[in-house]
Image (cartoon, grey):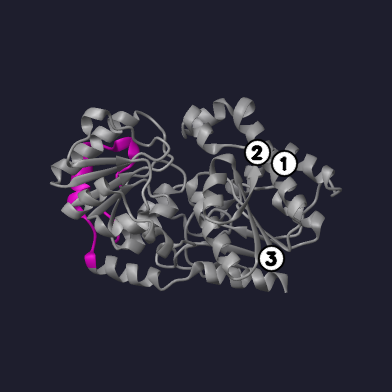
Amino acid sequence: MRILLLTAGSRGDVVPFLALARRAQEAGHEVRLAVTREFVAEVGAGGVEAAVLDGDFAELVRRQGVLPWAALRSFRSTVRPMLAAVLTSAVDAALDFRPDVLVHHPKVLSAPAAAAHLGVPHVLVELVPTLTPTRDFPAAGMGSRDLGPLNPLTYRATAAASSVVAGVLRDQRARLGLPARGPLPAPVVTLVPVSPVLLPRPHDWPATTVVTGAWHEPVLAAAAGTDAELDELLARGDVVCAGFGSMAAGDAEQRARTVVAAVRAAGCRALVVTGWGGMRPPPGLRGGDVVVRRSVPHAAVLPRCVAAVHHAGAGTAHAAVRAGVASVPVPFLGDQPFWAARLHRQGLAAPPVPARRLTADRLARALDVGADPVRLAAAARATAAEDGCATALAHLEEAVT
């Protein structure tokens, strides 16, 4: 079976697809993974053939950060042209590879048109619950207040997002010889690569929406190990791993000072993970009790930490649960408050400290609260028993038969 996977966004949008691509390849399938330019080398290093989508989200974040108002301000000049290039190059990737099944991130809105032109099924990957309506909770990113019977209405906003690139999608339909308007074939299945530990399957989701468990490679990640300086810090114990992924917003230097001050006040050592610019520690902040890295292998590092301070992105939230380490969520925007609330509700995290209210005192108090060790251990065991990639691959194989 020839499988084309298409994804776009931050590293959290790429890593699950890479894990699935590797698993499919190990099962004997012919796989290609299409990603934007900043991830091509990582995909290749993972042993998977990469197709290049014409965009660079890391560069976009570096230039304007992640705040919504910045994206709105530059939407016509920067954001929309890049989205158009991504959608066009995604169609190019599909026409070039001619897969038997097309698996795509919700951002790749041109994927259904490419699949219709090729006459092959497509599979939607709902990394975050924003597309399949349910009465159980509002769409992630639409507030944490439970609206009961009105919850399904919150999913309409996400569904309407395609209107901002409607012209691009019409152009792709015309290019592919498809009708300019009207529905395209629906995905044969929607895969939700989330652990039931964090998101029990809603009772009112259709059978075609499947919670698979998270897609990850814990063995490979753990085998990556750490460097000597970091290993020495972890061996000394009482390490708090702190990182905010792609959240380049506000004063990243002051945020680093705040986090390190809180960790020191809690009597711990700090591993500061800068990511795409969520923190920028000044040279004077580093010392024997502070190590700074751009990224670290979560599976190797988090089990050796006493807590993880993070933005509550889906990938990092799952990594902390698998490691059995207490989370201290500091959500910024989007779906992060959703995951932060779920971690706390399950007894796996301290109460969230919203980024806009982050102070050293608040963070130190949250570190002191910690999480329920019994629940942490049970959740780690449950997630370790999941094999999300295997479940997803079984559905892909069924889609093509």
Indicate the quadrant containing the N terminus: top left, top right, bottom left or bottom right: bottom right
* Amino acid bearing label 3: Val
Q: Is residue 361 left or right of residue 9?
A: left
Q: Which residue is mark 3?
A: 188
Q: Looking at the picture, which amino acid does disc 1 mark?
A: Thr
Q: Is residue 20 magenta?
A: no
How would you rate the neighbour count of disc 1 (Cα within 10 Å): few for under 14, some for 14-19, many for 20 or more?
many
Query: Image quadrant for the C terminus?
Result: bottom right
Circle 1 residue: 88
Give the quadrant of residue 88: top right
Q: Which mark is residue 256?
A: none
**Point 28% across, 38% down: residue:** 358
Q: CA distance from mark 3 to mark 2?
A: 27 Å
Q: Residues within 10 Å of mark 3 (few under 14, many from 20)?
A: some
Which span is picked out in magenta? 348-373
- Which residue is denoted by mark 2 in the rendering? 54
Residue 182: x and y, percent?
A: 80, 51
CB under 8 Å between callouts 1 and 2? Answer: yes
Disc 3 to disc 1: CB gap under 8 Å: no
